[in-house]
Image: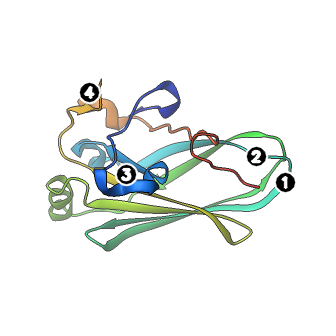
Amino acid sequence: MLFDLAAGSMPSPPPPDIGEDACRFIRYHFGPELLEINTIGTTLEFVNGPYEVHQFRMIERHYFRDQLITSYDFTMPFVMPNSRNTWEMIYTKPLLSEEWKEALRSAPWEARSDSFYFVQDQLIMHNRAEYNYSPLGLIGRHPVHPGASKQLRKARVDPVESRFALN
């Protein structure tokens, strides 16, 4: 596991110029080893309110220097009312040449993503992230060992803290 937000692991702090969007922004310092992994799994934990939700969808687009690298599209057809949910997403990464990998390693925070969340095709939330594939050191105050990126990342989104709600 790279880090677990629910357990107190902290990603890198957002840049100072992010302003009011800080609650919708996160930075991940994964290290260069992640570029060698073909498949990554993540889990998103969330709580739904009193109404059922149909067609909960996440579209995530990854860019490097404003060029689209890959796009993912995940759908959860139904979410029960008054439920706590765990949604696992499996990402198959695109094959990158050594030239691309070196560019990503040498340009911290220039790899970015946008995650768009929809309910019945209506946008309900937009999150942004930046990625750093340079060698690992410390993420905030938490040391990260070089083999950590070979495991799955588990991120918990607290609906109260992130103001994430389906209805």
Check residue 145 in the rendering and tell me which mark sits there, or answer none: 4
- Look at the image and tell me whether residue 92 can be seen: no
Residue count near mark 3 (Cα–Cα under 10 Å), binned few <14, some 14–19, many ≥20: few
Instruction: Kindly state the secondary structure of the residue where label 1 is placed.
Output: loop
Instruction: Kindly state the secondary structure of the residue where label 3 is placed.
Output: loop
Q: Mark 1 near mark 2, Cβ–Cβ under 8 Å?
A: yes
Q: Residue type at mark 2: give it.
A: Asn
Q: Earlier in the sequence, mark 3 or mark 4?
A: 3
The quarter of the picture where the N terminus appears is: top left
Q: Is residue 100 left or right of residue 49?
A: left
Name the one closer to the observer, 112 or 158. 158
Decide: is 72 above or below 12.
below
Q: Mark 3 near mark 4, Cβ–Cβ under 8 Å?
A: no
Q: Residue type at mark 1: give it.
A: Glu
Q: Earlier in the sequence, mark 2 or mark 3?
A: 3
Instruction: Identify the residue under disc 3.
Output: 38
Mark 2 and mark 3: span between their CA atoms?
Answer: 32 Å
Nearer the observer: mark 4 or 1; the answer is: 1
Q: Is residue 140 left or right of residue 23?
A: left
Nearer the observer: mark 3 or 4; the answer is: 4
Mark 3 and mark 4: span between their CA atoms?
Answer: 20 Å
Mark 1 and mark 3: span between their CA atoms?
Answer: 35 Å
Instruction: Kindly state the secondary structure of the residue where label 4 is placed.
Output: loop
Mark 4 and mark 2: span between their CA atoms?
Answer: 35 Å
The quarter of the picture where the C terminus appears is: bottom right
Decide: is 47 above or below 18.
above
Name the one closer to the observer, 25 or 116. 25
Instruction: Identify the residue under disc 2.
Output: 48
